[in-house]
Amino acid sequence: AQSVTQLGSHVSVSEGALVLLRCNYSSSVPPYLFWYVQYPNQGLQLLLKYTSAATLVKGINGFEAEFKKSETSFHLTKPSAHMSDAAEYFCAVSDGNFGNEKLTFGTGTRLTIIP
Amino acid sequence: KAGVTQTPRYLIKTRGQQVTLSCSPISGHRSVSWYQQTPGQGLQFLFEYFSETQRNKGNFPGRFSGRQFSNSRSEMNVSTLELGDSALYLCASSSGTSNTGELFFGEGSRLTVL
């Protein structure tokens, strides 16, 4: 069974500083990995996804993530934080089997931006 | 292209009642999944429907049920509500015919059980 672990339930960074949100996965098959963002009182929006095409994945709003098989990691980064980045971020994994639309989510990381 | 639409957005029920939530997927999407989000348990998979058939099921009691109609719209029902059922219920749609697992989420239905 697949699983993801997000390290740090709360992360605070200053505006303009580097954002680093950590995600480690466990999967018996090559995984498909995702980062979703949730703003208050809203659903989840896809930031980016890894589906084995390229290890460095660029997403929306300046975010990117690097798939590192040796470290079983898929950390999310953004070079310069903006106030609008304040939200909750979820890492998720799918085993990529056809017909399996189930995602397993991490527990989430709440990102606070300090002015 | 319209996104995933969930109704109602907010509702309050009392213990023992039942509730039905509705989800309209993105046009052309044939798969609809439901997730429960709570502060304590996070995001948990309830079930997924594809072409009116339940294709995947999570680990929830039988009080939680769902169905999908021929136009791909889906409903989920919770019977005999308990306080612990208070949560944000999220619906997500996808084509259902790829294996990337990419889901498109609605804004959710927030259920409060008193």
Image (cartoon, coloured by chain):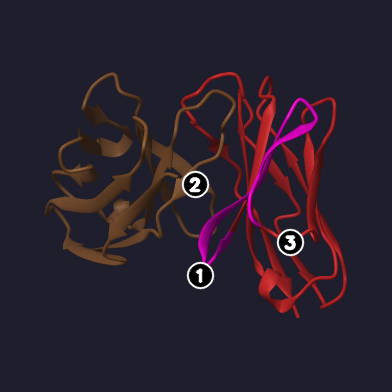
**Image location of residue A63, percent across then percent down:** 25, 39
Residue at 33%, 60% (x, y): give it: A109
Foreground label between 1 and 2: 1
Could you tell me if residue A39 is visible in this image?
A: yes
* Image chain in brown: A
Could you tell me if residue A114 is visible in this image?
A: no
State the SS at label 3: loop
For label 2, count other residues whose C-alpha is less than 10 Å away and answer few (under 14), some (14-19) or many (20+): many
Q: Earlier in the sequence, mark 3 or mark 1?
A: 1
Residue B80 in which image quadrant: bottom right
The span picked out in magenta is B37-59
Residue at 29%, 67% (x, y): give it: A10
Residue identified by numbered label 2: A44
State the SS at label 2: strand
Q: Are marks 3 and 1 on the same chain?
A: yes
Q: The N terminus of chain A lies in which quarter of the figure?
A: top left
Q: Nearest the camera: A85 or B110? A: B110
